[in-house]
Image: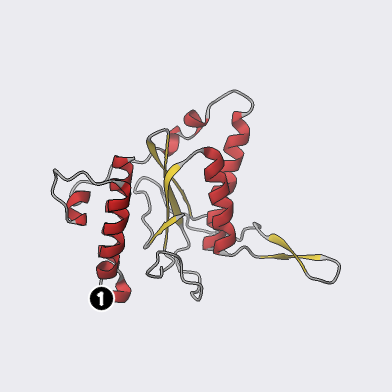
Amino acid sequence: MTTAYPLSWPLARPRTINRKTASFNKRVDTGKGWSASKELSVADATRRLQLELDRLGARDYILSSNLALRLDGLPRSDQATPSDPGVALYFSLKNVPHCLPCDTFLRVADNIAAIAKHIEATRAIERYGVASIKEMFAGFAALPAPAGQRPWREVLGWRQSHVPDMQDIQTRYRKLTKECHPDNGGTHEKMSELNRARDEALKEVS
């Protein structure tokens, strides 16, 4: 799963003021004949989300959060929960871009797990034949980018006539990450713009 930093929250979605503790725990074997409840890690929650996205048939999914990333694009394992634990999942479903944001809970892992549960529940509802997956996700269609933002080709350093494929986009993204990432002298604003440009580029060529 592709991850993006910092959090790119959809403008039309209000933020949660009073967050709460979740119960998306997992059971682990204690080795003493019984199991115990343990908090989900980000890796645990991401695996749950990946499974649900595969079952849904989603494409080009990107999980955005305030977890700082290593240069390989994966979240660092030694960091504390950020002050803003919100996450936003961007994906394409039947060639329509969607966004599922969640900041209901106090931990990033729990907000990721909540999105996975939402997708699981939505797929279950479809079995009754009242509404299709496409209809149920219609309210989460991603809005166009606000005016004033640079076009993705400009951000990625290409001419308007250039038509890249997905591999070109990911290669250019990794290259520019080394310049834009805050750990390398860049800024959060530059990294956010780069993430947005990559997302838009992948959606256009998919």
Q: Counting other residues with Cα less than 10 Å from the Cα at mark 1, is it few (<14), some (14-19), or many (20 or more)?
A: few
**Residue 94 point in image, percent of width and height:** 42, 33
Q: Which residue is label 1 attached to?
A: 185
Name the residue type under label 1: Gly
Residue occupying image coordinates x 51% and y 72%: 77
Residue occupying image coordinates x 21% and y 55%: 156
Coloring scheme used: secondary structure
**Residue 171 point in image, percent of width and height:** 30, 58
**Image position of 19 with respect to 96: above or below:** below
**Residue 54 point in image, percent of width and height:** 53, 43
Q: Quadrant location of residue 140? A: top left
Residue 161 visible? The answer is yes
- Considering every residue shown, the one lying at the far right of the view is 33
> The C terminus appears in which quarter of the rendering?
top left
Q: Is residue 168 left or right of residue 4?
A: left
Label 1: state its secondary structure.
loop
Q: Quadrant location of residue 64? A: bottom left
